[in-house]
Image (tube, rainbow, N blue to C red):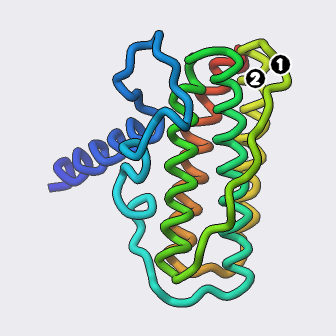
C-alpha cells in the first residue's frame, strides 16, 4: 500500500514539474513569447496550484501579500519574456516564461476566489545583457529574491489556501526555476 501511495506521489510530483517547466511541443526554431502562448498555457495544473480555494473575504494584509506576490511573478514573466526577445527561443527562458505566467494566473484565481480583482499588469521588462549566462545569473538572483519574498509573506498569519498557493510557488522557484538558471549560468 505504501509503495502505491509513493508511486502516486512521485507521479504527481513529476506532473507538476513537467507543467512548471515543460515544453510547448513547438519546434526549437519557433520563437516563443508570453504573448504567443495563448490560452492553452494558462491555468494548466488545475485550480490555483491544486490548492482548495476559499471564498472568504480577505483582510487588507492578506490582500497586500497576494498583490506583492503577483507583482513579483509578473515581473519575472516580463524579465524572462524580454530575455526571449533579446536572445531568441533559448532554454531555460522558453520554459520559465510559461511557468511564471501560470504562477501569475494562480494568484489571480486566488484573488477571484475571494471576490477580489487582480491589479493591472506590470510594465514590460528589458534585458540588461545580451549574454545568455549573464541573463541566467540575473535570473538566479531574481529567483532567490522570490524565495525570500515568499518566506517573508508566509511568516505572517495567512488563510490556508493562500499559504498553500504561496508554498507551491516558492517550491517551484527553489526546486525548478533557480536550479535551471544556475545550470544555465554555469554556476554550481
* Label 2, residues with CA under 10 Å away: few <14, some 14-19, many ≥20: many
Task: Name the foreground residue: 154 vs 78.
Answer: 78
Q: Quadrant of residue 51?
A: bottom left
Mark 1 — residue?
A: 129
Task: Name the foreground residue: 67 vs 6.
Answer: 67
Q: Is any atom of residue 154 visible in this view? A: no
At 23% from the left and 49% from the top, the residue drawn is 8
Label 1 or label 2, whichever comes before in sequence order: 1
| Place of residue 103 in the rendered image (x, y in percent of width and height, measured from the top left) | 54, 52
Q: Quadrant of the N terminus?
A: bottom left
Does the CB distance between marks 1 and 2 fall below 8 Å? yes
At 76% from the left and 47% from the top, the residue drawn is 123
SS class of the residue under badge 2? helix
Select label 1 or label 2 by which is in front. 1
Q: Quadrant of the C terminus?
A: top right
Left or right of 174 on screen, residue 95: left
| Place of residue 72 in the rendered image (x, y in percent of width and height, measured from the top left) | 72, 52
| Place of residue 97 in the rendered image (x, y in percent of width and height, measured from the top left) | 57, 36
> Compared to 31, does 165 lie above or below?
below
| Place of residue 21 in the rendered image (x, y in percent of width and height, measured from the top left) | 47, 34
Mark 2 — residue?
A: 135
> Compared to 132, does 115 lie above or below?
below
Task: Name the foreground residue: 101 vs 48.
Answer: 101
At 71% from the left and 60% from the top, the residue drawn is 151
Amino acid at each position: 500500500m505504501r509503495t502505491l501511495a509513493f508511486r502516486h506521489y512521485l507521479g504527481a510530483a513529476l506532473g507538476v514539474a513537467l507543467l512548471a517547466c515543460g515544453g510547448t511541443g513547438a519546434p526549437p526554431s519557433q520563437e516563443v513569447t508570453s504573448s504567443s502562448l495563448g490560452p492553452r498555457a494558462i491555468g494548466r495544473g488545475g485550480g490555483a496550484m491544486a490548492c482548495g480555494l476559499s471564498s472568504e473575504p480577505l483582510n487588507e494584509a492578506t490582500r497586500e501579500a497576494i498583490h506583492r506576490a503577483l507583482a513579483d511573478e509578473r515581473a519575472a514573466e516580463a524579465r524572462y519574456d524580454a530575455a526571449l526577445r533579446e536572445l531568441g527561443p533559448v532554454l531555460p527562458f522558453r520554459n520559465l516564461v510559461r511557468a511564471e505566467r501560470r504562477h501569475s494566473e494562480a494568484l489571480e484565481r486566488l484573488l477571484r476566489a475571494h471576490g477580489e480583482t487582480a491589479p493591472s499588469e506590470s510594465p514590460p521588462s528589458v534585458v540588461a545583457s545580451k549574454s545568455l549566462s549573464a541573463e541566467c545569473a540575473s535570473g538566479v538572483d531574481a529567483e532567490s529574491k522570490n524565495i525570500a519574498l515568499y518566506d517573508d509573506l508566509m511568516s505572517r498569519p495567512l488563510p490556508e489556501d493562500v499559504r498553500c498557493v504561496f508554498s507551491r510557488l516558492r517550491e517551484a522557484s527553489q526546486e525548478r526555476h533557480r536550479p535551471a538558471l544556475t545550470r544555465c549560468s554555469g554556476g554550481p
